[in-house]
Image: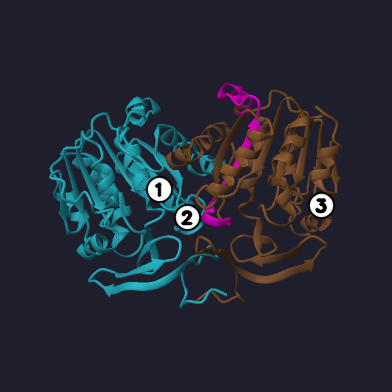
Chain colours: A cyan, B brown
């Protein structure tokens, strides 16, 4: 029914589901030292980046993920100036971070420079802020970079990684979270993409336990639609020492002064609502 | 890549996407006087009902849709006693409605009795409340039933229909909405499934205009994940004369006294948050 010459399909084998996009053509494919990257032109979703067979982003719907990985954390920290993005080589999260005028430096550390170079070519809207003097792009191992980071030198760490298999597996461990915690200041926040609330409750549970084990006292997951990811429903998890809802700078988010497509102050609050089955599972 | 002997796929042709479930076997198929119905046993989603090639519900994720089609409206009306469901032949919405002890009568009018008979067999958990003395199941044309309903005789009308093509097209017109309005009491509410916020903004816009034209002063769409529907993101639209957020009976929802899997008071509020691009599109 779905012919692989016309469709790109990502199968979620354990859940027996698949999401497919009809393709016009494959624009690029390469094996880097770290992973296999493909770029497709699709009929309805613009360009599509696929890494190791998994959809990473499309032109049409990446705004959901990138806005929700950045703005909720940035409007929760009282005064985020020093931001670090681990992974995120497509630069979409970096672009959102740089929309905040209070951010003084934003360093992005992706192990694979080819993700960024291909993004510059096929998703130029996402890399449009890369020349911002506050931005620094490094291509090395984020786990080691965080180990070497000066204690208390960061306000926000955004872990914008692939799934917890392959090169990203080290980004889901309590050792890594402990290094993050040391690198963060007193009000520091960590945010990590945390998979599907429907398919990956076990990953969510284990990630929360690892964050707690690393000394983060409070952990909150937030939820948003992401059509091209398995189940079409995704999450990000915030970790800090105090995530009381009163810390959300609601009025600042209301008066944000930059454009978004999904995020606003009400969507921020809404994303924090816990579905009943997850409230029971996550406690 | 996805072989039709192993997978059921629903294609969204205009958006060039498809969602697929791996199937164990096709349990049933029939052409009724109204539509073509199939039931599949899937690997990861339990049983699946498909009507005219479109996924209707799965055992695994129907809770999202059924809870969001019922509880937000029931906890917004001050005292819902008389409820009518147009469509909804699988009885999942009826089951949720009957969880509210204040509901005195719930009539379900689906044009196709076979949907209910197949649901009794393949989704028995959804039809478990059908013997409730407050429930009445009719199999006739819901548009005509509403035309004949006594003015002011209903508190809540839930339009739990298929997409606005085929037998359901009459359920998306301002004539139908005007008949609904006449059948509703002063505080009466209408709620209608209203498709994907990402794929179907035009349907959402036209439906809102038709509801307004029929005399509903206030219209609010609410949003929720629904993995098996196109884009994995869905909406329901509430219409009434006063939908001020203060009308939401938050404390009653908090103390609801029955189990849900997705819905709770916070999820109710969250579902009403309008994504930025829809705020601009819907005004």
Please state the chain letter of the residue tagged with numbered disc 1 in the rendered image.
Answer: A
Residue in front for this viewpoint, B25 or A279 = B25
Name the residue: 72% across, 57% down: B166
Name the residue carrying label 3.
B111
Residue in front for this viewpoint, B165 or B59 = B165
CB-based contact (under 8 Å), mark 3 and mark 1? no
Residue in front for this viewpoint, A108 or A173 = A108
Q: Which of marks 2 and 1 is nearer the N terminus?
A: 1
Give the side of residue B268 with respect to residue A98, left or right. Answer: right
Q: Does the magenta stretch include residue B240?
A: yes
Q: What stretch is highlighted in magenta?
A: B228-253
Distance (Cα) linking label 3 and label 1: 38 Å
Tally of numbered tags: 3
Query: Is residue A178 visible to the viewer in this orientation of the structure?
Result: yes
The spot of residue B276 in percent (x, y) is 43, 39
Give the side of residue B195 with respect to residue A229, left or right. Answer: right
Give the side of residue B112 with respect to residue A184, left or right. Answer: right
Name the residue carrying label 1.
A64
């Amino acid at each position: 029914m779905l012919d692989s010459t016309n469709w790109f399909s990502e199968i979620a084998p354990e859940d027996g589901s698949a999401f497919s996009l009809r393709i016009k053509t494959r624009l690029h494919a390469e094996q880097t030292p770290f992973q296999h990257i493909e770029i497709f032109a699709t009929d309805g979703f613009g360009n599509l980046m696929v890494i190791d067979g998994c959809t990473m982003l499309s032109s049409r719907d990446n705004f959901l993920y990138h806005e929700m990985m950045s703005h909720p954390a940035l409007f929760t920290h009282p005064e985020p100036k020093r931001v670090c993005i681990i992974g995120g080589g497509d630069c979409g999260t970096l672009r959102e971070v740089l929309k905040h005028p209070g951010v003084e430096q934003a360093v992005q550390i992706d192990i694979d420079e080819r993700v960024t170079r291909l993004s510059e070519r096929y998703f130029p809207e996402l890399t449009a802020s890369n020349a911002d003097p506050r931005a620094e792009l490094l291509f090395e191992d984020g786990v080691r970079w965080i180990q070497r980071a000066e204690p208390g030198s960061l306000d926000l760490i955004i872990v914008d990684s692939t799934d917890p298999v392959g090169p990203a597996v080290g980004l889901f461990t309590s050792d890594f979270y402990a290094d993050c915690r040391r690198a963060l200041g007193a009000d520091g926040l960590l945010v990590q993409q945390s998979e599907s609330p429907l398919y990956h409750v076990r990953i969510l549970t284990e990630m929360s336990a690892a964050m707690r084990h690393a000394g983060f006292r409070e952990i909150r997951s937030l939820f948003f639609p992401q059509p091209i990811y398995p189940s079409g429903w995704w999450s990000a998890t915030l970790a800090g020492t105090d995530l009381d809802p009163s810390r959300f700078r609601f009025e600042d988010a209301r008066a944000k002064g930059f454009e978004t497509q999904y995020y606003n102050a009400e969507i921020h609050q809404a994303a924090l609502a816990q579905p009943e089955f997850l409230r029971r599972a996550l406690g």
